[in-house]
Amino acid sequence: MLYASLVLLNGDVYTFNPRQPRAEAIAVFDDKIVYVGDDRGAKGCVGPTTKVLNLKGKVVLPGFIDAHIHLASYGKALSALDLRGMKSIKQIKEAVRERAKRTPSGAWILGRGWDQEVLEERRMPTRWDLDEATEEHPVALRRVCGHVCVVNSKALRMADVDESTPPPKGGRIDKDSVGRLTGILYEGAQELVLRAAEPTEEELVSACSLACEEAVRCGLTSVHWIVSSSAELRAIKRVKDEGKLTLRVYALMPVDLLDHLKGLGLWTGLGDPFLKVGAIKVFADGSLGARTAALRRPYDDDPSNYGMLVYSPDELKELVVKAHEAKLQLAIHAIGDKAVEAALNALEEALRRPTKHHRHRIEHCSILDEDLIKRMKGLGIIASVQPHFVVSDFWIVSRVGLSRARWVYAFKSLLKSGIVVCGGSDCPVEPIQPLLGAWACVVKHPIVEERLSVEEALKLYTINAAFASFEEDVKGSIEVGKLADFVVLNEDPFEVDPNRIKDIEVLMTIIGGKVVYSKFNVSA
């Protein structure tokens, strides 16, 4: 008889398998589920070397999957200045000044998380503000959304950026009324400076390892990891080779690597259960927080501004068609309705070519309307959404007006139309915890009609996210034959007051039948 390597007993298991919604026990052999049912049946799988865990009635769900996360950036942010929640430019300057005291002269000071919407001054910081904090260190502080940063004068000098520097494609270099650089860089222009502050290979590997450790503490067993460069991809591979990749990675590659992937004949899904080639990530526009998301009508609080498209419609179509024909999934960042329309036009052109199940995605799809949703459904496009945005974007009505705000983050409308919707954090833009995203879906959406049930919200981070990576047959639910990826919680999200979903603790994370995180005594 073949005995299980791991048995979980006395659990309250939500399987997300409609043929067997609930269970109390699970048996695992190697990295796969071999039994789901009651304790009596699972005990029949116990042998002399079986590890048996008594869950003492705790809730078990399929392992969480984050469908949109910048894990390397998160790892780097853990050691950078955390500016989230700061209420004034004065407070930001003080944080920089304090960091400068314990940073060698000439070394970079990096930070992230400021938001001009909550600052007392009601404006973005400038290079002159940062110069007051330190002139001995180059400083670069990214806005919470990551689509704009402010740098000091020393950083501009080190990057050889001055008033004559032309903005890169898809970027903007801000200047004041007399033509002086303000130190504020939008979208692609950020790289003019940030490339001078790139971490070493060892620093990048360390950041990736640290981020993975934090991710499994939050119950994540898989991530759709948005990769920013070939160097970052090499770092992930090295983390895996060194045995430190504790969770499964579906890599969303930057469009800069499209020609390399195509030339090597690599396609979506190639890899192994812990590291796979995923989609090609393409930016169509910016963010609402930076007012760079491309809108059909101008911003209500900036009537001369329509945002910005990164590519012309023809350029976007060319990229999308190239990726599609190379058998690579598309993940198109499109926040404004104009960008969503451009993305759909490009995808429609690509889908004129014969293909198997493409499962192309639009990331964020923040501002929609009924026609755009119908087009997404008709083309079979997946909506990859970031639910915690509804908490952070408290200013949305003033930014885009009441009529458009009705269609911002239209979670329920997308699901009701039959579109597959998957959920991600966009960490470090938003907190990494999936349960915070689920809570936001259920209770925090300002449009009550767009709120989700608890089951709908949790499926964004399980079976729906698995579908978005072509992996619904191996993960996303607890079924015999699937990978043994689970999360154990201290409370039942289906039973607690919905407002308390965000307070539920992850007690254990199991990936491939191995406990990778635990704060719970589970002796049999």
Image (cartoon, rainbow, N blue to C red):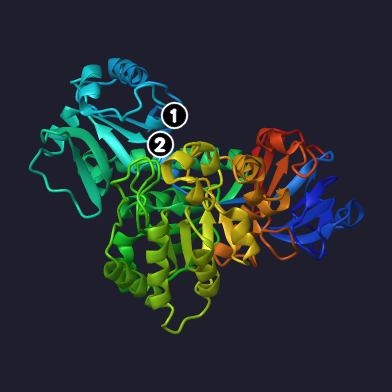
Q: Which element type, helix, strand or loop, lies under badge 2? A: loop
Residue pointed to by mark 1: 84
Whether residue 185 sits left or right of residue 519 in the image: it is left
Instruction: Name the amino acid type tagged 1.
Output: Arg
Q: On the rendered image, what quadrant is the C terminus found in?
A: top right
Residue at the location (78% across, 43% down)? 59
Quick one: label 1, few (<14), some, or many (20+) residues within 10 Å? some
Identify which residue, 31 or 390, lies in the foreground: 390
- Tell me how many marks there are: 2
- Whether residue 120 is situated above or below residue 218 in the rendered picture: above
Q: Which mark is residue 144?
A: 2
Residue at the location (28% across, 19% down)? 100
- Whether residue 93 is situated above or below residue 247 in the rendered picture: above
Residue 329 lies in quadrant = bottom left
Whether residue 362 sits left or right of residue 94 in the image: it is right
Mark found first going from the N terminus, 2 or 1: 1
